[in-house]
Image (cartoon, rainbow, N blue to C red):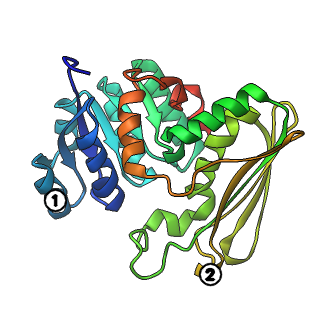
Amino acid sequence: MAGTPKLRFGLFGTGYWAGQVHAAALTAAPEARLVGVWGRDRFRTAAIAAPYGIAAYDDADALIEDVDAVSIALPPDVQVPVAVRAARAGRHLLLEKPLALSASGADELLGAVTDAGVASVVFFTSRFVPAVQEVLRDAATAGGWYGARGTVLSSIFRNGSPYAKSTWRHAWGGLWDHGPHMMSLFLPVLGPAEEVTAVQGQHQTTHVLVRHAGGAVSALAVSLTVPKASTLLDVAFLGDSGVTHLPIAGAEPVPALARAAGNWLGRLPGCPEAMSVTSGSAGR
């Protein structure tokens, strides 16, 4: 979009996802300009900043002051206070899931966004993949779904995995890591969740049943710790006319986040596909 000023972004976080996805995507997005990065470890902050030629900040509030929007790739317990400060300073928010680790934390952030009137979006990779967006639009238009199933069984703590040392994932498991992704796909088609029940299985697998408004029921099976040989990814809607699978396998996060950086403020077609805090994602 020639002549359109780029939105100045500050990146918060220095882990794998911050460097390999957020920084790369914000550098590639034509609507964004990555200005600087802040992290809790100054050496890792400098390591993220160097290849992108951006400033390494040792003061989070100084980075907030210098940008129009923040892109947060921090653990959820750290994300909330940073995001609240950014919202209260009038900065737009590109957030990660889970939004928070408590309802009170999510409510605090929702309140800050609402009071400040800033734009916000929680980044769910598949929601910004055009092929998935098309299936969701068609499914929502067609209706007639009595349920959905989502199975995401992974093995992420093995040697060599970029998430092997993720403290919050070890503590909170697949329900908090994969679960929000699944619900971001189900809610636009099946409607709000009205009743939830869950049981724990072997390999820290969580099995969840969700009754949606209108009576449809979605079933989730999620884990981060199954044996590598039994990993599985499958998401589908179930209706009177058949089964519709969502093409989420192989979704590339960098182009998806670059698309999100343009869509979330209505700068590109497809902005309604973004799931904003004010439209309910805070309640995950």
- Disc 2 residue type (three-letter): Ala
Instruction: Judge from the rendering whether residue 284 lies leftward or rightward of residue 216; answer left or right.
Output: left
**Which residue matches tag 2?**
229
- Residue 142 got which mark? none
Residue 125 placement (x, y as % from top left)? 49, 46
* Amino acid type of the residue tagged 1 in the rendering: Arg
Q: Quadrant of residue 2?
A: top left
Q: Quadrant of the N terminus?
A: top left
Where does residue 225 sit, x and y in percent of width and height?
59, 75
What residue is drawn where x is 44% and y is 19%?
Answer: 115
Q: Secondary structure at mark 2?
A: helix
Q: Nearer the viewer, mark 2 or mark 1?
A: 2
Q: Quadrant of residue 107?
A: top right
**Which residue carries the number 1 mark?**
42
Where does the image place residue 23, in percent across and percent down from the top left? 26, 48
Total marks in image: 2
| Foreground pick, 126 / 195 | 126
Q: Residue at x 81, y 31 (%)?
A: 213
Q: Return the residue nearer the eye: 1 or 110.
A: 1
Mark closest to the chain's N terminus, 2 or 1: 1
Query: Callout 1: 10 Å neighbours few (<14), some, many (20+)?
Result: some
